[in-house]
Amino acid sequence: MNKLYTLVSPGSFRCWLCCLLFFVTTAALAQPKVGYSYVNITKKTVGGTVEPGDVLEVRYSVMFPWGFNAANNRRVYRVRYYDNVPSNTTMLTGGTDRLRIITNEGTTFYQYTLATGDDAGNYKATAVAPEYKIRINIGGPLGLAPTAPANNLTTDLTGGGTINLTASGTGDQPKWWTGHLFSTSFRVQVSGTYGQTITMGGGRLYYSLLSNGSGATFLPVPTYTIMIAKDDALCDNKVGSNFAAESGGTFGNAAGLNRAAGPAFPVPSYSYVNNVSASVAVNDGSYAIVNNTSPRSSTNTNARHIPNCGTGATAADDCNNRMFGGHWDIIGDHTGQTTGASNNPPASTTSSGYMLMVNSDMVTSEAYKQTINSLCPNTTYEFSAWVKNICSTCGSNANLVATNLPGVLPNLTFVLDGVDRYSTGEIAYGSSWVKKGFTFTTGPTQSSVTFSIRNNAQGGGGNDWVMDDISIASCTPNLIMKPYGNATVCYGNPVDFAADIESISSNYTHWRWEKSNDGGTNWINETSGTGTPVLASGKYTYTVDHPSFTGDSSAHGDIIRLRVATTAGNLDDNSCSFLASTQVVILVNNCQNVLSSDITQFKAQQINAGVSLRWAAVNEMAGLKYQIEKSTDQRNWKKLPVVSAKVTAGQNNYTELDPGTLSQTTHYRISMVLNDKIKYTHQVTVQPNSSVPSGLTIKTIQNPFSNSLPFELVVPENGEVNIMLFDLYGKPQKQLNWKVSRGSNRLNLSETSTLSAGNYILMVRFNDQVAQKKVLKMN
């Protein structure tokens, strides 16, 4: 969408613009512009990778400015386009297949058969380089409108048609405010197989500034490489964000319509607008970083829009609250949303998140680029972003008559290290943001990649979009311990347990068991090896057994965990390996009745003063003691004061108080100790009084934090949460599992003083629910 931005009313806008347009655009667009792209017709509305059998439409987009070549009647002569069929594709040559001239919206303006000698286009399958297989003569015979296509069909460099660039009112169609705008197109079908690439390029547009055709000029295009790949689903288990240079892909948060800092990675072919306002627009080929798409920071999402501006509107309802006097949506950014909803548009003084706002160039071109470092070798990642079409009324026909429809629909390609990997398909206008992305695996030694985003559609009359929450995240495997929870055995018996490893990719083959005998402070490497994943139900799965050992006093209290990675080297890198969300605590009980004493009942109840503990015992022996222990995770147990047995005949009753306010689910047990003999009771659980929450929520959190990170977590039921703290490069800095109870739980991520100052992501996973918060570490 590109209109000269002004404060005049929409009714007088276009008339005033037309009077000035011829004079202001010749200098602004002194030279023609071209672009090269393709649209996956098979997946035009849904997007995805390019797969065998897909139909691709190859487009060469062209923009000739009005008034160009003023010295020679503002015309260009002998205009013709040449191209070849991309590798690993075949030309579609059925009875309805055509060479076309299309508008910026992709609709057919002219079409020609593939045959030679009947119209202005031809396809020669037997052409040998340097001869091209495809040729389209563009424009009309000298002095005539292009409604009568040129009939010079030779394949030399002297034929072609004439394009009239007098002005927007009298120049040739298809028109835009600033020039003659169109694309050539032809269609091919992918014949290559998965893993192969398609190379397209080499096409060029020829034209002459002189009517006799001498001094021909040609405009080349870049060569593109397209990966033929399966259209895999995005990760269902991912962590991390490597877009640190753009605040983790969120573009930051502050008050003020325009972000103070410019883009971390400027796009050379686009102009950055850092002062969007009521008098400064984001025109074609420009972009901005804003927290509100309204140039006036309007908070009224229902303000009037074209064609319903009318008269008598209030200031809050006026069309000028929208970009270009009534066209673009009024929304806030997307960060913090888990669905397609937008955040509320903020006022100019309200702190809010920013987003990338793009008005696409007249020709297809790159719109974003960034190099990402510190990736892990041979590791699967997801690259994704949330995108929204923001104009419902930007369309116009080939004669520049407004249709008040969305017009050009954004269609973006995500490029990885110069290879096209995924296209979004056409992003239809609607109320929601849509998430688009793909997965990829780094090479055996690769640690960095370069991403770019390219427009497949032309600008002018639409192709206006916003993007937020760009993410590159590790697709982590699921590690499921068996048994889930602690391994409790009798003294002298074997201890056996295992883990299932599940992943969307087959590369997490390296594993290692690790053990701690000091409560998790230090870890010792045990056994390691490799597994052979087998594809089942869409996941690659294998099982790792822990070597069996005998449960005795030396093993009691040990903690065992499993680590997996894609290479042996990655096992030693905390940033490139993954731990099971559950650790196994070895509990060795003396299961023989060597103690004749028994606890016949054991109860715990929350009271105002704390937790009341009551038990009854029989057959007590001299010297018997009761050691009360409590835990909030059933792993780490705190010892309370020891109680000596009464040692009287019959049943003896005991009551003890664990003082203090109970803020989370707490577990209690009692061990009967006599000399070197120990006998445990069953555990009892006490839950704090709380209402039942509807879902996983990080309710309150200390932000910023320093030596520790305390927070309140609300969970819908009893269970265990996996807590991870990531830096903005996706590297896990802290990880632990915590038993939680239904309702509110006060947790504390301790020992954070050694972390560097900066932004981090706190992520909590409970069953299939995930909650996360962005936090700031300060020294």
Image (tube, rainbow, N blue to C red):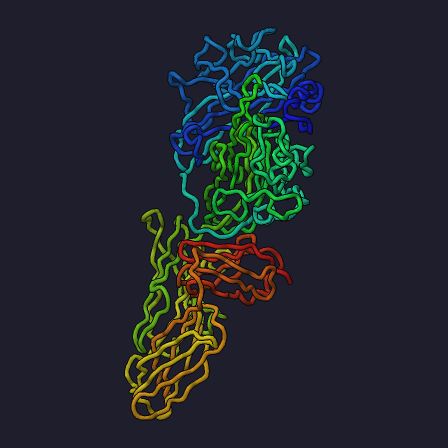
Image quadrant in which you'd find residue 695: bottom left
| Vertical side of 159 occupied by 664: above or below | below
Residue under the image location 59 percent in, 46 percent down? 353
Residue under the image location 63 percent in, 29 percent down? 312
Residue 105 in percent (x, y) is at 52, 24
Residue 582 in percent (x, y) is at 41, 63
The quarter of the image holding the N terminus is top right
Query: Is 584 left or right of 703, judged from the image as shown?
Result: left
Query: Is 491 left or right of 310, judged from the image as shown?
Result: left
Residue 93 in percent (x, y) is at 40, 19
| Vertical side of 497 occupied by 592: above or below | below
Residue 601 in percent (x, y) is at 32, 80
| Vertical side of 391 occupied by 770: above or below | below
Could one spot residue 58 in this view of the protein?
Answer: yes
Query: Is 548 left or right of 398, judged from the image as shown?
Result: left
Q: Which residue of the protein is positioned furthest toward the front in this rendering? A: 312
| Vertical side of 221 occupied by 564: above or below | below
